[in-house]
Image (cartoon, rainbow, N blue to C red):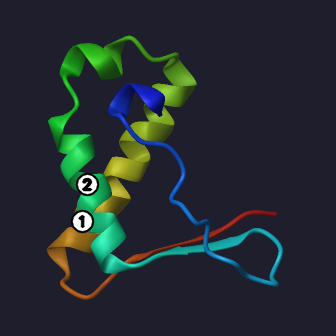
């Protein structure tokens, strides 16, 4: 992710639930703008699985942008 000029949000959202995170709409808008600004060469240079994950997250961010007021919620086992 450092190739995109950002890392994890700071401060990280706190939750007492294991494996749960929320990115509000404004954070998703910033992240999507950065994703769109990434050069194709930057994406192509990523490891295959990492590239797939970044592209999937880009899809989530695009979906959030298409629906004003929506963010992204993630759950990990």
Rendered image quadrant of residue 55: top left
In the image as oriented, which residue stretches furthest toward the bottom?
Answer: 69
> How many marks do you count on the picture?
2
The quadrant the C terminus occupies is bottom right
Q: Is residue 52 left or right of residue 77?
A: left
Q: Are marks 1 and 2 in contact (CB under 8 Å)?
A: yes
Return the x and y of residue 30 as percentages of the image width and height.
26, 59
Return the x and y of residue 29 as percentages of the image width and height.
24, 65
> Residue at image x 50%, y 43%?
7
Quickly name the residue at label 1.
29
Q: Is residue 12 left or right of residue 16?
A: left
Of residues 38 and 53, the one drawn nearer to the viewer in this rendering: 38
Q: CA distance from mark 1 to mark 2?
A: 5 Å
Q: Is residue 77 left or right of residue 58?
A: right
Say few, some or many: other residues with alpha carbon within 10 Å of mark 1 (under 14 / 14 to 19 / 20 or more): some
- Circle on res. 45: none
Vertical placement of 34 versus 26: above or below? above
Vertical placement of 7 versus 70: above or below? above
Quickly name the residue at label 2.
32
Vertical placement of 16 versus 11: above or below? below
Return the x and y of residue 67 as percentages of the image width and height.
20, 81
Local SS, label 2: helix
Of residues 53 and 4, the one drawn nearer to the viewer in this rendering: 4
> Residue at image x 50%, y 19%?
48
Vertical placement of 50 versus 33: above or below? above
Say few, some or many: other residues with alpha carbon within 10 Å of mark 2 (under 14 / 14 to 19 / 20 or more): many
In the image as oriented, which residue stretches furthest toward the front?
Answer: 11
Local SS, label 1: helix
> Residue at image x 83%, y 73%?
18
> Residue at image x 52%, y 16%?
47
Rendered image quadrant of residue 37: top left
């Amino acid at each position: 992710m450092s190739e995109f000029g950002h890392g994890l949000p700071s401060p990280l959202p706190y939750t007492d639930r294991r494996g749960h995170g929320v990115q509000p709409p404004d954070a998703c808008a910033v992240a999507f703008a950065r994703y769109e600004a990434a050069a194709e060469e930057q994406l192509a240079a990523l490891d295959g699985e990492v590239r797939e994950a970044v592209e999937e997250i880009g899809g989530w961010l695009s979906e959030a942008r298409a629906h004003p007021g929506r963010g992204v919620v993630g759950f990990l086992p």
